[in-house]
Amino acid sequence: MECMSLLGFSACAPDPELRASLPFPVFDINRDSIPPMLRRRTSQATQMAFSVASAVCVETRRSAAALPAVFASVAGEIQTTDRLCTELVKPEGVISPSAFHNSVQNTAAGYWSIAQQCTQPSSSLAAGCDTFAMALLEAWCQLSCHGGELLLVCYDERWPTYLDTARGERAFACALVLAAEAVDDAIAHIARPHFGAEAFSTLFESLAARMPVLAAIPLLGLTSAGGAAQNIPVSPVVPGWQVRISPLNTIPVPL
Amino acid sequence: MPFAHPKADPIMTMQSHISPVAVTAYQCVSVAGDDVESLYLSLIANRSCLKPLRLFDIPFETLVGEVTSPLPDIRPGLKAYDSRNARLALKALNQGDFRSTVERAMASHGVGRIGLVLGTSTSGIYDSENAYAHFQSKGVMPTDFQFLKIQTAQATAEFLHLELGLQGPCYSISTACSSSAKALGAAQRLIAADFCDAVLVAGVDSLCRLTLCGFNSLQLVSPEACRPMDAKRRGINIGEGAALLLLERLNSENAARPRLLAVGESSDAHHMSAPHPDGAGAVLAMTLALHLAGRDVSQVDYINLHATASILNDLADAKAVNHLFPNPPPCSGVKGLLGHTLGASGAVEAVVSLLSLERGFVPGTCGFEQSDPQCPCPVTATPLLDQRPRLVLSNAFGFGGNNASVLLEAC
């Protein structure tokens, strides 16, 4: 496979200040994207994942039921897990069965497959600071081996501050629809992930260091702004995982 | 048709086959013992290893597959990663010649060409629970508690990566009980897409209050040794363990090793904690594994069932096999011996399947006595020592309706 085609993306951040600071369109959680049955039962993480996944399927006019999915998150359902752990150390702590099955990392992926009646494979991965990068790598491998298209959803809700004082404050989610090879309706081509030393944008470096899924900022920003092809980091760790992005949605500026 | 999904057919959209990879080493620490030899002896003896829990107190009765032999210390430079999960992984790494086989692969392929994919559902949450107890009494987390290096799903993957000095891609898959079966699939793709020449696959899960009490809240925990596929089953037993498999690109040196042919993956799209009642997702996962490998149902010699001994899981499992196989091969499940090792079970049972291929036998189903008329598949109660399976399917199904079926073949 020569490249992946990015067919569209969407992004979500509940914090208006974060939304305003990002160089591409970002929405708040869209409760209409979550089936009414699930609205009260699901976490911020799952609601953000649904918001971006629904939006990108609409934007790219893809049927969610037809897309294999790669969900990626550093901490998964950390708020639910935190509540369970707090209960577990109480002498009379009560564990709710639904809270338990909603604490697995693939909660968002599971509810998404049920809501969309999607029987395609769905994965949930975590890779610390490299979570967005490894999600792109997993997407590359799936498309390279099996062809077709897939949905990538990368998200993290707020983490309880006492778990990690340095990270986890700004909840963020993004979703991408990716296709194998160069296809007609691509908005960008993404070349094979590789190790590189291109610096992370100084504007967003500290944001991404504090919330690793914000490592998606340079990729989404460049795709949105357009311009010349560039190597950009997809992890806050530099040197580290990078990709070459060729935006296609604007007319290239003549030299 | 007993079931039909109206939407896209994953088999029709799945283009090609995938190249097999060699399994050049494998190890397993479980309640059956510290290495594959003790696991093999336990499979042949077919006597339950499940015992009352010693690690912590729980307010209900059950048996567990607890590793009670001493776990190794994490070396000083990596202490931040010290968790029961990491220790189980380190123990497996140090068994037999596993570590030296990985080091041989590092020397021949280069550390940047070896990846690591770990499947886990618990990660280091057992140690987090202890930290929460500290938090409750002292109002602060212990000073040495590092969330990313203990609790999050990639913690033990990162530990193994640093312990070995690997520099290839490193990530965890956490899809509940299918986690490490899916890790095998991701690893095979990393080799096929030429990011790696070898990938260390790990399935590691440790006992913790969260999973014991969580499954108990779902009323799925058996007070006695579990009885997979048996008419008198009373639920599941939780286990723990670490299974490691080294996958390598096929070459002349590993031509005699068993092979991972494919991993079929699917979603039930039915319920968060109950399988599709007809096993539709399980059928799809097994079908995809065979399709990707270019093999036929008639060629499968043994099916390692997921067989947790929860009634809904057992029924879905059996119905799926019955639907797909006109003449099913011997089927069995090992959770009556080892307990359900959750996120590790896919890798643990891939190791069981490899022992079956390499040592020539079909494992039994410890705890199975009386067949359930609702379970229409042939269940092997005691080990079949006269069988020489060459093609084995090993199933792992998890919460969220997440399914993976691993297809392994003798060389």
Image (cartoon, coloured by chain):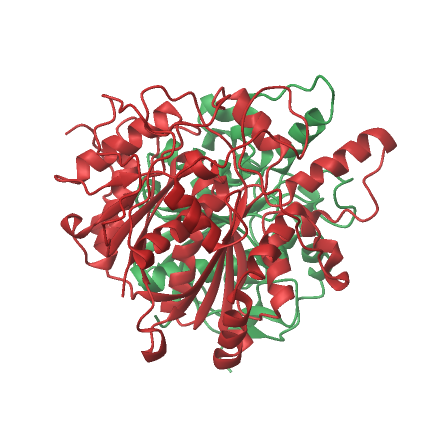
Chain colours: A green, B red
Compare residues A172 and B298 and report the one nearer the observer: B298
**Could you tell me how many numbered marks the image carries?**
0
Compare residues A125 and A210 and report the one nearer the observer: A125
Pick the quarter of the image with the C terminus of chain B: bottom left
Residue pushed farthest top?
A: A92
Q: Is residue B28 above or below residue A84?
A: below
Q: Is residue B279 above or below residue A181?
A: above
Pick the quarter of the image with the N terminus of chain B: top left
Residue B371 picture location, percent across and down: 26, 25
Compare residues A43 and B79 and report the one nearer the observer: B79
Residue B390 picture location, percent across and down: 24, 57
Residue B327 falls in which quadrant of the image? Answer: top left
Residue pushed farthest bottom?
A: A255
Residue A143 picture location, percent across and down: 35, 60
Q: Is residue A26 above or below residue B106?
A: above
Residue A106 picture location, percent across and down: 49, 40
Q: Is residue B261 visible?
A: no
Q: Is residue B158 left or right of residue B27?
A: right
Q: Is residue B91 left or right of residue B28?
A: right
Q: Is residue A251 left or right of residue B60?
A: left
Q: Is residue B331 visible?
A: yes
Q: Residue at x 68, y 48 (%)?
A: B83
Compare residues B28 and A211 and report the one nearer the observer: B28
Q: Residue at x 24, y 22 (%)?
A: B374
Residue B328 falls in which quadrant of the image? Answer: top left
